[in-house]
Amino acid sequence: QITLKESGPTLVKPTQTLTLTCTFSGFSLSTSGVGVGWIRQPPGKALEWLALIYWDDHKRYSPSLKSRFTITKDTSRNQVVLTMSNIDPADTATYYCAHFREAAAVFPDYWGQGTLVTVSS
Amino acid sequence: QSVLTQPPSVSGAPGQRVTISCTGSSSNIGAGFDVHWYQQLPGTAPKLLIYGNTHRPSGVPDRFSDSTSGTSASLAITGLQAEDEADYYCQSYDSSLSAWVFGGGTKLTVL
């Protein structure tokens, strides 16, 4: 059974750096074809893909946000970490991590419950 | 503005059939990238509903189906039930953006 859970601060001040951790179970990020990614959803708005890390440590970022994001993995601890720099109130959202299933183009199949991050001074 | 365009809302009476469209372009749906559908009940995380053209995860009833033609896809729900009231999102990959993209979401109201 695949499960994922996000953790991190719920309130962050503008310009700070936000670090979110995804802790997962039921699969290994060393298995070929697998990925873990981050997707966010501002209140009342649509889903937006942010970043993805593959089993082989290959990383992909949203082109519009690339310069502010860093994604890393710790395979031994079953964790993926997303770091966002220079946080802005527009980054207020529920952040989800998701298991990306192997396919011609991988896609998110299992999602965490999400964590709401509010950016405010 | 989402790369994949969905109607903001649809509605139907219990027992009826509704469809939700997802319009893309030649760099995503039209390029042959699979379209996947997610259901998001109020206050919960999205749940995979249909993937890779008509595949349903275990537990998803066959009242849910999808189709793709050209640069568009559609989700069909038959025999509407009150529990189907939720937001629905389509998702694909865009080769021009090199990004995973979502539709803007459609709110389904069961009258």
Image (cartoon, grey):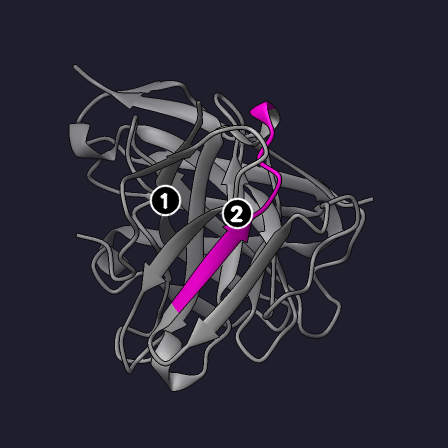
Residue at 30% across / 26% down in the picture? A43
Give the CA separation, mark 1 to mark 2: 11 Å
The residue to which callout 2 is attached is B38
Tell whether position B76 is magenta. yes
Rendered-image quadrant of the C terminus of chain B: top left
Asked whether, in this view, residue B31 is left or right of residue A89, the answer is right
Q: Of discs 1 and 2, which sits in the foreground?
A: 2
Residue A19 image offset from top left, x and y in percent: 41, 36
Residue at disc 2, secondary structure: strand
The residue to which callout 1 is attached is A47
Mark carried by residue A93: none
Question: Which of the two residues, B91 or B54, is positioned nearer the viewer here?
Answer: B54
Output the chain of dot 2: B
User: What segment is highlighted magenta in the picture?
Assistant: B73-82
Residue B31 image offset from top left, x and y in percent: 38, 85
Residue B110 image offset from top left, x and y in percent: 47, 26
